[in-house]
Every structure is written in C-alpha cells, then in structure tokens.
Image (spheres, grey):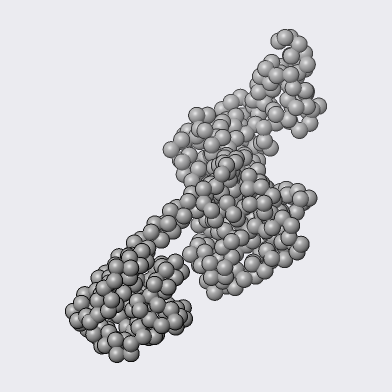
C-alpha cells in the first residue's frame, strides 16, 4: 500500500481528485491534504508519502517554490502536477523537478488514474531496483566478511602466518588499533553456531565480537573480542560478562561448555599464539572439578608422570593384533585416571602421548615403511583440541584398537613355534624391562615351562639370549656412534653400567671400550 498527499488551494479540486482516485484505493490511499506549499511541506514531513499531487498556482508558497524543495529534500517522492494554466514556465519548472506527469485542469477520472498507475509502476520499479542493489551490496559485503573470517581462522589454527589487508569494511574497522582477546569454546557436543551468531547480533555485539567455528571440529569454536587500546577498564570484566551471558544460552541448549581465555594481544598475526594460550588454559581443567572458565597463566605447572604397570603390555597387545585385550587395557588405564584426585587434562594428555609414543616406536620397528611422523602429527593435532576425560578415552580407545586391528594381518607373533615368537618379542623390546616372567604372561604360558622349553630349543637360557641380543645392538652403537658408555648401556636395555660391562664381556670376551678401540 502506497500513500499520497494532495496540495491545492481549491477545496473542491482536492476532494474531487480523492474521489477520482477511488478505483486505485486498494493500492494507493490519501494520507492528507494541504491548501498551500508550506502546509504541504509540513504534511509531507509528517506522513512520508510516496506520491505528491500538487497544483502550481497557490497562495503562501506556490508550485514554483515547492517543486525545487521537494526535488532536493525528497528526491525519492514521485510528483504529479495538476494545473489550470497551460504556461510554458510552469512546464519548465515541472520538467526541471523531474515531475512524472503534468495534467491540465479539468481532468477526467481516466486521466488521473492512468497518471497514478504510471507513478506506481515507476515506484515499484525503483523499489525493486533499490532492493536488488541493496541485496547485491549486502551479499558482496557478506562474501568479503566470509573471506576475511577464513583468513582469521587460518591464522588461529596456524595455517597462515600473516593476514595482509582485510577486504571487508567490518573486519578492517574491528581490528584497527585495538586489543584482541581470543576465547576458545569447547563442548563434548556440537556447538550451536547459529544460536551463537544470533546472540551476537541480537545483543548488538557485532562491532567488537566475532564467532568462528573450528575448521575440523564441531565441538570447538572461537570468540574473538576487540577493545580500544586506550580503554581504561579491564577487558577481563567485559570478557567475564560475555561468558556469563553465553552460559545462559548454552544452559537453555543443555550444553556444557568450557572457556579458555588468552592474554590480550595487539596484532591479528598473534592469534596463532593466542590459540595456543587458550589450549594451555583449557588443559588446566581438573577431571574432578566443575570449573569451566580458564585463563591463560604464563607460569603453569608441568604435567606429572603417572606410572602404570601395564604400559608395555598394552604396546605388545597392539603389536600382536589383540584388539579385545587392547580395548580392555585402555579401559583399565582410564579407570586409573578417573580414580586419581586433582588430575588435569594436561596430565592425562602427557601420559597418553608418552604411551602412544611407545606404540609409534614399535610401529617404526615392526613396519618401517609406515610414515610415523605423519601419524604422530595427526595424533597431536587431534588430541590438542580435546579437553574432556571421556573424549580422550574415546579417542585413545579407538586409536589403539584401530592400530591393533591393522596388525592382525601382519601376524608378527603368528609363528606356530612359541620360542620363535618369544625371540621376536625379545628383538623388539630388548630396550625395555624384559624378563621371562613378563614374556610368559604375554604369551599365556607358565614361567617355568617357558624357561624349560626356551633352554631346550635354543641351547641357552632366556637371560643369556636376551643379553646376546642386547650386546649385538650395543656393538652397533659402539661402531656407528660416539655416544658415552652409559648412553649405550641405556639404549641397549641396561640401567646399570657395571652390569652392562659384565654382560658385554661375557658375550664378547672383552669390555665395550676394548671392542670400540679394536673396531676403530
């Protein structure tokens, strides 16, 4: 529905015009009348019509004075002039003011209706073009913002070292001479991206808060907050307030979210470091605590080593392709973590990474062609963005059982002869705490039986064979490296250097020093 006003000093002309426009009243309604140009301007300013129908010859302010004002101040309003004077000057004024139509009095219903329809058609066309232009502009700006958000995400995640120039006005303004704080959001369930973005828009935080989803994890997202560098109040107060408001949103979504807060930074290129700070902050989470907001602390505690008696059994189970046993051992490991009070996510990650390191070492030995560095990097990247005990459990249970499953076809311990399998085990684990008791338990036989059958088939005891394997590797290190004796002893499986010397001499008939000199 469109509105029009009529300006004419003749009462009957005004009423007659309104009556003649009755056939188009479903799309055009009269919003008011005025008897001169001055009153007409006041009316236009009040009702904001899309169309003005005006006479030229009027008291106080006539059409020649009114039209230039309308043309300059209200260029979007359509104009129709009705006049009883067929005067060239009036026509010239109307053309200059971009009047759509000029109708001479007296006019018929058909004439005024046809003129108005022409106006409505033009208004519709202009409105359509305006909407189209606005949508195109908004779409272009949105595409520029999305491009810039992709750049920022790549910087945060470490795929890009510098931003260069942003292309969108919004992002350029947001980061111009401002402090930056990064908040990493983490949940065990997918974050509600649309709700977070709506929260930012609804609360008019768009000028200083951005939300960016992580590229690989639906459970992770980033809030980037900017503050004027000269701001007097601490940004921490504002950050905590936003977190409080977001917590209400997540509570409605029945979602538990952790917040890792970085230190303040002054350059967009520092967001990579800010993300690492939020990871360190979130890793402070204690498994027996309900705290969910963590700030980066520059001097944090070192992770603590948690001894576990079955670590080497787990590594062996993986290599042996024992999938079910591997799963049970991971269950046992995480049951241990759950029972330890005041244990942090950082502690668990540290210990699990140490265990997976043992598996990676075993992989490199058993399957040399495997790209261990890529496996290590993938594991590190995946674990970096997990901050709950249950998620770590699911990840590592899948990780170890999948590797064990892949080893089934390798049949590393698939020899029908038990002793051959034990020899393979010794060759792979000579650096570790290897004993006949451990070997017997791994291969599900009695210790005495294994000792007896091993000696019978090899002609030497288990320990003598183990020392022979260890000395063989020690000889390789003595020839190929300049490592010190205690280092070679450790790398060969001996924690005691004196025992290493005795074992070496028993096998080779000379000390390690003598062997090195002889070979050189």
- Whether residue 389 is visible to the viewer of this picture, yes or no, is no
Please report the residue visible at 40 percent of the width from the left and 77 percent of the height from the top: 62
Tell me the quadrant of the picture where the N terminus can be found.
bottom left
Query: Residue 426 at what x, y percent from top left?
Result: 61, 32
Residue at 69% over, 51% down: 265
The foreground one among 134 and 375 is 134
For the residue pair 90 and 6, the one nearer the viewer reads as 90
Measured from the top left, where is residue 200 in percent x and y? 55, 66
Q: Position of residue 406 (x, y in %)?
A: 46, 41
Q: Quadrant of residue 341?
A: bottom right
From the viewer's perspective, is residue 276 above or below residue 204?
above
Please indicate whether residue 133 sits to the left or right of residue 371 in the image: left
Q: Nearer the viewer, residue 87 or 421?
A: 87
Q: Is residue 104 above or below residue 398?
A: below
Q: Residue furthest right?
A: 498
Residue 478 spot, x, y in % from top left: 71, 18
| Figure check: 323 above or below 459 | below
Rendered image quadrant of residue 160:
top right
Number of numbered discs visible in the structure rendering: 0
* Quadrant where the C terminus is found in the figure: top right
Residue name at image x 29 percent, y 90 percent: 12
Q: Residue at x 64, y 55 (%)?
A: 182
- In this rendered view, identify the residue nearer to me: 376 or 136: 136
The reply to whether residue 410 is in sight is yes
Q: Is residue 495 left or right of residue 138?
A: right
């Amino acid at each position: 529905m469109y509105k029009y006003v009529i300006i004419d000093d003749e009462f009957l002309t005004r009423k007659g015009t309104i009556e003649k426009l009755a056939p188009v009243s479903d799309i055009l309604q009269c919003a008011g009348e005025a008897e001169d140009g001055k009153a007409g301007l006041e009316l236009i300013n009040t009702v904001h019509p899309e169309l003005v129908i005006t006479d030229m010859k009027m008291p106080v302010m006539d059409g020649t004075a009114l039209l230039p004002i309308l043309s300059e101040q209200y260029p979007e309003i359509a104009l129709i002039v009705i006049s009883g004077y067929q005067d060239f000057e009036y026509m010239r004024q109307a053309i200059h003011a971009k009047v759509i139509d000029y109708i001479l009095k007296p006019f018929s219903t058909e004439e005024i209706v046809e003129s108005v329809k022409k106006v409505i058609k033009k208004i519709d066309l202009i409105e359509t073009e305006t909407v189209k232009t606005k949508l195109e502009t908004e779409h272009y700006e949105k595409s520029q913002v999305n491009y810039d958000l992709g750049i920022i995400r790549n910087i945060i995640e470490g795929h890009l070292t510098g931003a260069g120039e942003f292309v969108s006005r919004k992002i350029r303004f947001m980061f111009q001479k401002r402090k930056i704080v990064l908040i990493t959001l983490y949940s065990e369930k997918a974050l509600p991206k649309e709700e977070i973005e709506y929260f930012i828009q609804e609360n008019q935080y768009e000028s200083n808060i951005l939300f960016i989803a992580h590229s690989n994890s639906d459970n992770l997202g980033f809030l980037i907050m900017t503050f004027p560098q000269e701001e007097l109040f601490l940004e921490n107060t504002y950050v905590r307030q936003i977190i409080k408001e977001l917590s209400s949103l997540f509570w409605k979504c029945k979602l538990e979210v952790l917040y890792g807060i970085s230190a303040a930074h002054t350059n967009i290129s520092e967001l990579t470091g800010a993300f690492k700070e939020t990871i360190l902050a979130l890793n402070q989470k204690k498994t027996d605590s309900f705290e969910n907001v963590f700030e980066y602390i520059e001097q944090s505690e070192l992770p603590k080593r948690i001894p576990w008696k079955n670590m080497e059994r787990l590594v062996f189970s993986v290599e042996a392709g024992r999938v079910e046993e591997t799963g049970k051992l991971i269950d046992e490991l995480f049951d241990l973590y759950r029972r330890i009070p005041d244990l942090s996510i950082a502690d668990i990650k540290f210990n699990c990474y140490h265990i997976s390191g043992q598996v990676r070492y075993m992989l490199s030995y058993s399957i040399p062609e495997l790209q261990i560095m890529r496996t290590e990097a993938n594991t590190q990247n995946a674990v970096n963005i997990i901050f709950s005990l249950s998620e770590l459990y699911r990840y590592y249970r899948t990780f170890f059982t999948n590797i064990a499953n892949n080893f089934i076809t390798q049949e590393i311990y698939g020899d029908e002869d038990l002793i051959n399998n034990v020899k393979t085990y010794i060759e792979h684990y000579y650096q570790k705490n290897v004993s006949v008791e451990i070997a017997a338990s791994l291969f599900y036989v009695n210790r005495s039986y294994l000792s007896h059958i091993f000696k019978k088939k090899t002609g030497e005891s288990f320990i003598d064979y183990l020392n022979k394997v260890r000395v063989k590797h020690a000889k390789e290190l003595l020839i190929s490296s300049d490592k010190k004796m205690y280092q070679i002893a450790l790398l060969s499986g001996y924690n005691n250097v004196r025992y290493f010397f005795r074992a070496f001499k028993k096998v080779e008939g000379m000390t390690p020093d003598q062997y090195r000199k002889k070979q050189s």
